Image: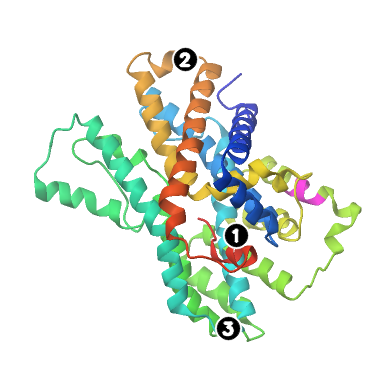
Amino acid sequence: MSLSNPLAWFAICALCLLIGAALSHTSAFYRQRQEEASASRFAEVDGLRGFLALGVFGAHAVNMYTLHTMDVWAAGIAPFYVLTARAGVALFFMITGFLFWLRVLRSEGRLDSRALFVSRLRRLTPMYAMSVLMALAVIAAASGFVPHSGLAELARELRPWLSFGFMETGAINGVPEARYINAVYWTLAYEWMFYVALPLLALFARWPGSLALLAAVVVFGTQAPIVFNFLFGAIAATLVHRRTLGRRLDSPWLAPLPVGALVLYFMAPDMHGLLQAAVLFAFFVFVVHGYSLLGLLRTGPAKVLGTISYSLYLIHCIALFVTVRAVDSLVPIASLEPLEYWLLAALAAAASVLLSACTYRYVEHPFLRSQNSSRRQAHEYASV
């Protein structure tokens, strides 16, 4: 097995699903969360989230290997894993655009901005703060629990870690690789920019050209192709809200299309960001209309992974860093065979899922407002 072999990722997904199954069978709390996800109108979206987080995990596992063997943070040696990470982030953004633009459409443009920002703060901040504390604890251990910088310098180095991704993290307390202990915060900044723009966009929701306006804001306001995914999520929401497609996507003649879109995405890695977003949209629009990948996205284990996906997204890099660094101190990572390294990565994935199950239960969930129905919960809790 080579480091770029896709089978390693599918094996890790299977392992995580087994852990999800164990959680759903042994924990009354997670059985209840699974039942709530099953009752959601968009249960397949909930089931997709965990796989998106694991897609990002795969690329970061390769990155962590190159960091310890080549002193560079790059996954280019394993193109499949680069694409799984891009797809994971892109579809997370699509989910956010879908759920929140659907809320705007259902409110006929009368979005409660205060409720929006309060719900986002309650949803995103506690686990973000916990992940920062965890990363800082790892940094402290890596620096021997000894201050290597003055207080003013430490404060300057710490600021980016508290910025929700709006500032790039870097070395801290003499640990140059600190930024790689958690390499996902930059995506949170895009999430917040979308939320800040949403009340303004909602004012135009009743206009026929509302999506054109949204496209203009996305294109000219950010100049970053990745944000096209919010637009495609909003388009999917419009199709669902207006029942444009109805049950047309249920036709057996169209069944190969969502898988075909994924195959095209992985077979054409050099597509422009807009085209990549469009191809992933072709898959996503089937998911929001009930497509479940032969039932996989409706399974209990997938829903458990989806429930804890935000924690999993924020924790996995920390678990990878600690696991790989610990082994590297005993046996050089460069001396491991690819299969041995992927077994190590699988151990980190298992630890990430178990730790995420704990942080969701005791950090995330207590801050989530009680919902009157599981359907409302599905719209409220869009993950990153």
Which corner quadrant holds the N terminus? Answer: top right
Task: Name the spot of residue 270 as percent of width and height, x first.
Answer: 61, 45
Does residue 59 appear to the left or right of 295 in the view shown? left
In magenta stretch: residue 166: no
> In the rendered image of this protein, does residue 2 appear above or below residue 247?
above
User: 10 Å neighbourhood of mark 3: few (<14), some, or many (≥20)?
Assistant: some
Amino acid type shown at disc 2: Leu
Residue for badge 1: 95
- Residue visible at 64% across and 78% down in the picture: 106
- Residue visible at 44% across and 27% down in the picture: 65
Amino acid type shown at disc 3: Gly
- Residue visible at 72% across and 69% down in the picture: 240
Task: Name the spot of residue 269 as percent of width and height, x first.
Answer: 62, 43
> In the rendered image of this protein, does residue 185 appear above or below residue 5?
below
- Disc number lying in front (1 or 2): 1
- Disc number lying in front (2 or 3): 3
User: 10 Å neighbourhood of mark 2: few (<14), some, or many (≥20)?
Assistant: few
Residue for badge 2: 336
Per the rendering, the mark at residue 109 is: 3
Whichever of labels 1 and 2 marks the residue nearer the N terminus, that label is 1
Whichever of labels 1 and 3 marks the residue nearer the N terminus, that label is 1
Are discs 2 and 3 less than 8 Å apart at CB? no
Task: Name the spot of residue 292 as percent of width and height, x first.
Answer: 75, 49
Range drawn in magenta: 257-261
Dot 3: element: loop
